[in-house]
Image: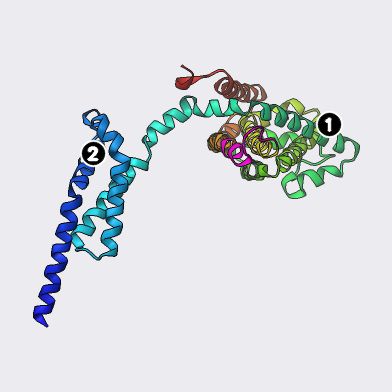
């Protein structure tokens, strides 16, 4: 039995050595390329090696598959598994660091994606304005519509027929009040949900996205009518604008992104539907990454600036500045890509 066992071991070792000798040159060549690329020595790699890199990776991956099937020695398997894993990151892994990606994203990638859906932004803007007008008109004809659009829990003291003093107390002098923070959190949560849904439902030809924009802005229009009746419309606009120019802009972009995907599905042009949808989806996804950042900025403005700034002119100034800043970034700034 010992003789048979020793013979089997020797046969396996011989087979493993022969397997390694026949392919080791490719393994070593791939490892040298991978080591240089991991150390950032790209200039030291010849064009011939760069062109051979994908083929060498597939060759070594094939060697690993054969080694597993033939149960070669553990050392060879471990070496090949490590080399294939490292080579995969070199061949297929990300080509830039997180900082480089963020610099490219904020340095022109995001604004370029937003300009790429300019047509849908125009449609979404018209729909949002129409939604606010519809909400205003509905409540002006029948105040009961207000509770259908806003909900009694969210409305709180902001209801049709409330006194000007009561309504003024909801937008001024709330630095120490916790109720305003709760209402602000409710508004932010609602708008975040609207943004996500407006984008996610874009695949249904963009129709649900537009309906969400109409419904969300109808509530804002209804609330605007309540404050207008009390002679506080300008103060209400200042209270909303300090964070709303950012938050509503984010909702606008998310609705436009969803509509962009839906339009690609409905009207792919000369391209296959899947190709058109994939291209639109990639562009819309870039826009939505930025929308998340905008919602974070809006949350900070809503949680701090709106509580600390208690005068309508100052609130309008902050809101107007944010609107101009976002508009300039999206439609005037070209960044590194533009240059």
Distance between the Cα atoms at labels 2 and 1?
74 Å
The residue that appears at 58% across and 36% down in the rendered structure is 284
Q: Which mark is residue 135?
A: none
Most foreground residue, 44 or 272? 272
How crowded is the residue under tag 2: few (<14 C-alpha within 10 Å), some, or many (20+)? many
Packing grade of label 1 (10 A; few <14, some 14-19, many >=20) is: some
Quadrant of the rendered image containing residue 204? top right
Residue 155 image offset from top left, x and y in percent: 75, 44
Q: Nearer the viewer, residue 23 or 196?
A: 23
| Residue drawn at 10 percent across, 74 percent down | 6
Left or right for 29, reference 138:
left
Q: Residue at x 44, y 21 (%)?
A: 336
Q: Which residue is mark 2?
A: 33
Q: Position of residue 338 (x, y in %)?
A: 49, 19
Q: Which residue corresponds to mark 1?
A: 229
Q: Earlier in the sequence, mark 2 or mark 1?
A: 2
Q: Position of residue 4 (x, y in %)?
A: 12, 78
Q: Tag 1, which secondary structure? A: helix
- The image's colouring method is rainbow
Is 214 situated left or right of 72 in this image?
Answer: right
Residue 53 seen in the current view: yes
Instruction: Count up the numbered dots.
Output: 2
Q: Is residue 54 magenta?
A: no
Q: Which residues are magenta?
A: 267-279
Up-down relation of residue 13 to residue 118 (above or below): below
Tell me if 252 is positioned left or right of 55 in this view.
right
């Amino acid at each position: 039995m010992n003789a048979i066992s020793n013979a089997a071991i020797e046969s396996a070792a011989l087979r493993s050595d022969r397997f390694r000798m026949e392919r080791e040159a490719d393994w070593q060549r791939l490892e040298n390329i991978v080591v240089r690329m991991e150390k950032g020595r790209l200039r030291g790699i010849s064009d011939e090696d760069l062109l051979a890199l994908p083929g060498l990776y597939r060759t070594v991956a094939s060697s690993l598959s054969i080694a597993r099937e033939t149960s070669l020695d553990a050392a060879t398997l471990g070496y090949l598994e490590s080399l294939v894993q490292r080579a995969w990151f070199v061949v297929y892994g990300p080509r830039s660091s997180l900082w480089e990606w963020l610099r490219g994203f904020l340095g022109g990638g995001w604004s370029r994606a937003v300009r790429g859906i300019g047509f849908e932004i125009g449609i979404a803007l018209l729909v949002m304005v129409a939604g606010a007008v519809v909400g205003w008109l509905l409540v002006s004809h029948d105040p009961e519509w207000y509770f259908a659009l806003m909900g009694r829990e969210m409305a709180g003291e902001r209801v049709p027929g409330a006194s000007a003093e009561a309504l003024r107390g909801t937008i001024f002098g709330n630095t120490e009040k916790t109720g305003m923070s709760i209402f602000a959190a409710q508004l932010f949560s609602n708008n975040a949900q609207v943004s996500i849904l407006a984008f996610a439902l874009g695949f249904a030809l963009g129709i649900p996205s537009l309906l969400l924009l109409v419904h969300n802005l109808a509530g804002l229009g209804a609330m605007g009518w309540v404050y207008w009746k009390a002679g506080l419309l300008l103060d209400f606009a200042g209270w909303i604008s300090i964070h709303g120019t950012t938050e509503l802009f984010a909702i606008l972009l998310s609705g436009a992104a969803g509509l962009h995907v839906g339009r690609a599905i409905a009207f792919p042009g000369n391209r296959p539907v899947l190709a058109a949808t994939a291209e639109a989806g990639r562009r819309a996804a870039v826009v939505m990454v930025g929308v998340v950042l905008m919602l974070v900025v809006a949350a900070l403005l809503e949680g701090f600036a709106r509580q600390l700034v208690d005068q309508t002119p100052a609130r309008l100034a902050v809101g107007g500045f944010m609107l101009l800043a976002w508009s300039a970034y999206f439609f005037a700034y070209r960044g590194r890509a533009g240059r």
